[in-house]
Image (tube, rainbow, N blue to C red):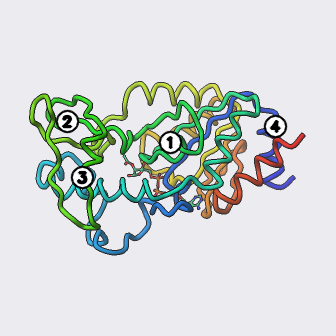
Amino acid sequence: MDGLAVAATALRQSRHIVVFTGAGISAESGIPTFRDQLTGLWSRHDPQRLETAKAFRANPALVWGWYLWRRQQMLQAQPNAAHHAIARLAVSGRQVTVITQNIDDLHERAGSQGVVHLHGSLMTPKCFACHRAAGLSSVEQSVSEEGELVEPPRCTHCNGRLRPGVVWFGEDLPTGAWKAAVQAARHCDVLLSIGTSGVVMPAASLPDLALASGAVVIHINPIDVGMDKSKEVMLIGDAGQVLPTLLERALAS
Ligand code: OAD
């Protein structure tokens, strides 16, 4: 059997599917991945240097401007065929848990519910000083041209600067989201790992956890990111093409 047939059979026989996604699933919606070369005015900045508390302390307007720009990119983007295929999977009668490392809302806009956001979200600003959640309206008022510095709005409780509700390098994952992800990875029959380079821990350990618990792990990526374990299947290609084909084959009666 070829990889697609093995993956389709595993999905057909499954009762609980975990869909674990990374930046690659949003690539076909026009959102650059982390390891893509950025073009334009942001190309002289390394995201890994902007996405830290240290960078925010040193230059809040630069970091806030960066996230406003990313938020605008997200709002202009539309969910693609892969996001839609995942949302349809939930109506196949199986338990489906969507776990994402992405801070965009494209899964939700495609119709997926209860999405576990391991790295937070661009939709949940909070105060850098007192950590209280801030209303989205505080972000909606500000717009950013590419590369523009924008002073963050202030917290209405303590006057601290607002920051995006995302997980920065060196910060812990939200406890509830991580617990839910581990629980789902340990109890699923199949974990679909889509569009992730699998290098950022601890999120990248979820496929291993599922394998160790006896699940089949199916990777979808234009490059081979498999670990050559016996219950792993590597499907090479773009998520927007491979995933709908796979699900159609798996779920066709
Ligand atoms: P990366 O940018 O590291 O990896 C994107 C992956 O998507 C690569 O393996 C690409 O080959 C793959 N890819 C590109 N186009 C694709 C397509 N059309 N279909 C399927 N796959 C495609 O993104 P992540 O793995 O998500 O962390 O990065 C993990 C974390 O690193 C991010 O969540 C972020 C970053 O630092 C935080 O913000 C904490």
Q: Identify the residue shown where x is 45% and y is 37%.
A: 117
The residue singled out by tag 1 in the image is 100
Percent of width and height locating residue 243 = 70, 52
In this figure, which residue is indicated by the disc labeled 4?
12
Q: Look at the numbered discs 3 and 4 and tell me whether their residues touch, using CB distance below 8 Å.
A: no
Q: Label 1's element? A: strand
Disc 2 packing (10 Å; few <14; some 14–19; many ≥20): many
| Distance Cα–Cα, label 4 vs label 1 | 23 Å
The residues tagged by marks 2 and 3 sit, at their Cα atoms, a distance apart of 16 Å
Query: What residue is rendered at 59% in x and 40% in y?
Result: 111
- Point 64% across, 50% down: residue: 219
Image: 180 above or below 141: above
Q: Secondary structure at mark 3?
A: loop
Amino acid carrying mark 4 in the image: Arg
2 vs 3, front mark: 3
- Tell me the residue that label 2 is attached to: 127
- The x and y percentages for residue 172 are 32, 35
Instruction: Identify whether 128 is placed above or below 224.
Output: above
Between marks 1 and 2 in the image, the one whose residue lies nearer the viewer: 2
Name which of mark 3 and mark 4 comes first in the sequence.
4
User: Which residue, given by chain and number where applicable, does mark 3 sit on?
Assistant: 142
Disc 2 secondary structure class: strand
In space, the residues marked 3 and 4 are separated at their CA atoms by 47 Å
**Residue 165 versus residue 246 in the image, above or below:** above
Q: Nearer the viewer, residue 37 or 148?
A: 148
The amino acid on which the numbered mark 1 sits, given as a three-letter code, is: Thr
Q: Which mark is residue 199?
A: none
Q: Residues within 10 Å of mark 3 (few under 14, many from 20)?
A: some
Instruction: Give the residue displayed 65% in from the left and 54% down from the top.
Output: 81
